[in-house]
Image: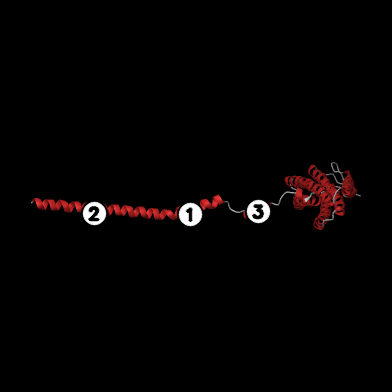
């Protein structure tokens, strides 16, 4: 195997961080393989299988980028300073796999799914942080290819993290249905809302509405009556004035 070439500070840092990412992908490859073997929920299992394919593709592309930058490949990745290495990553995953298997033996299936999804979500966020760091560094030092690779992988990890966050909610509800008696669960909000909408109206409300309507009905009549009274008073006043004028004229005539 040819000896790796001497790298400048920029490429040495990129190779170191990419090697760290490569080791994490190797760890997750083994981790996902173990989780798939413990998963019996079809939709969830299929999504894990798809992400396993993505993880293997990420590992291959990262290794190719390391090689292009002049870094070591294959077993030589173990010698890169700051990188845990593929073998070490798989060793960590193997230990975690044993923990997961032990958990499955003592836990209900729904609980096993939930705990595995929680571990997977944590690892996805670790990868998101790792590739964000690589992308930012590569952009700052003008390495467009490494930045594009890190960005593409990060987006895959973000999609998986989004799926796992939603799946965590679904799996928690599975635990409730599997382990908690129905009389110890919260009442459905839909049931409460229907009960509220179907409840009879109170008598006080009906009475107040009836009173309001009747008062509204009376109001026009009252105003009309008042108008009529006012008209009658005006007519009476005119009549009196006319009578007074006639009496005054008659007195004047008689005197003359």
Instruction: Specify which label sits upstream in the sequence, 1 or 2.
Output: 1
Q: Residue at x 16, y 52 (%)?
A: 247
Specify whether 147 is left or right of 71.
left
Q: Is residue 254 visible?
A: yes
Q: Position of residue 34 (x, y in %)?
A: 87, 51
CA gap, disc 1 and disc 2: 40 Å
Find disc 1 in the rendering and name its residue. Answer: 213
Within 10 Å of disc 2 (Cα), the crowding (few <14, some 14-19, many 20+) is few
* Secondary-structure class at tag 2: helix
Find disc 2 in the rendering and name its residue. Answer: 239
Q: Position of residue 236 (x, y in %)?
A: 26, 53
Specify whether 203 is left or right of 230.
right
Find disc 3 in the rendering and name its residue. Answer: 195
Within 10 Å of disc 1 (Cα), the crowding (few <14, some 14-19, many 20+) is few
Labels in figure, total: 3
Please state which of residues 143 and 151 is positioned toward the viewer in this rendering. Answer: 151
Q: Residue at x 45, y 54 (%)?
A: 216
Please state which of residues 164 and 219 is positioned toward the viewer in this rendering. Answer: 219
Instruction: Specify which label sits upstream in the sequence, 1 or 3.
Output: 3
């Amino acid at each position: 195997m040819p000896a790796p070439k001497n790298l400048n500070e920029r490429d040495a840092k990129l190779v170191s961080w990419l090697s760290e990412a490569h080791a994490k992908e190797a760890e997750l490859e083994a981790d996902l393989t173990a989780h798939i073997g413990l998963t019996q929920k079809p939709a969830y299992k299929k999504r894990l299988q798809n992400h396993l394919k993505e993880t293997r593709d990420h590992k291959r592309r990262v290794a190719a980028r390391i090689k292009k930058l002049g870094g070591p490949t294959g077993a030589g990745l173990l010698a890169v300073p700051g990188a845990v290495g593929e073998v070490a990553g798989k060793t960590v995953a193997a230990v975690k796999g044993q923990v997961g298997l032990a958990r499955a033996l003592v836990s209900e299936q729904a609980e096993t799914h939930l705990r595995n999804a929680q571990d997977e979500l944590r690892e996805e966020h670790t990868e998101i942080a790792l590739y964000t760091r690589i992308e930012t560094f590569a952009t700052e030092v003008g390495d467009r290819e490494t930045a594009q690779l890190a960005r593409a992988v990060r987006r895959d990890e973000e999609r998986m993290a989004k799926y796992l966050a939603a799946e965590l909610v679904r799996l928690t509800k599975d635990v409730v249905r599997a382990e908690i008696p129905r009389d110890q669960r919260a009442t459905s909000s839909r049931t409460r809302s229907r009960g509220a909408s179907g409840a009879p109206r109170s008598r006080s409300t009906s009475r107040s509405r009836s009173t309001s309507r009747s008062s509204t009905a009376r109001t026009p009549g009252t105003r009309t009556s008042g108008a009529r009274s006012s008209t009658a008073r005006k007519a009476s006043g005119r009549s009196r004035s006319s009578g007074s004028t006639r009496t005054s004229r008659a007195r004047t005539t008689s005197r003359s």
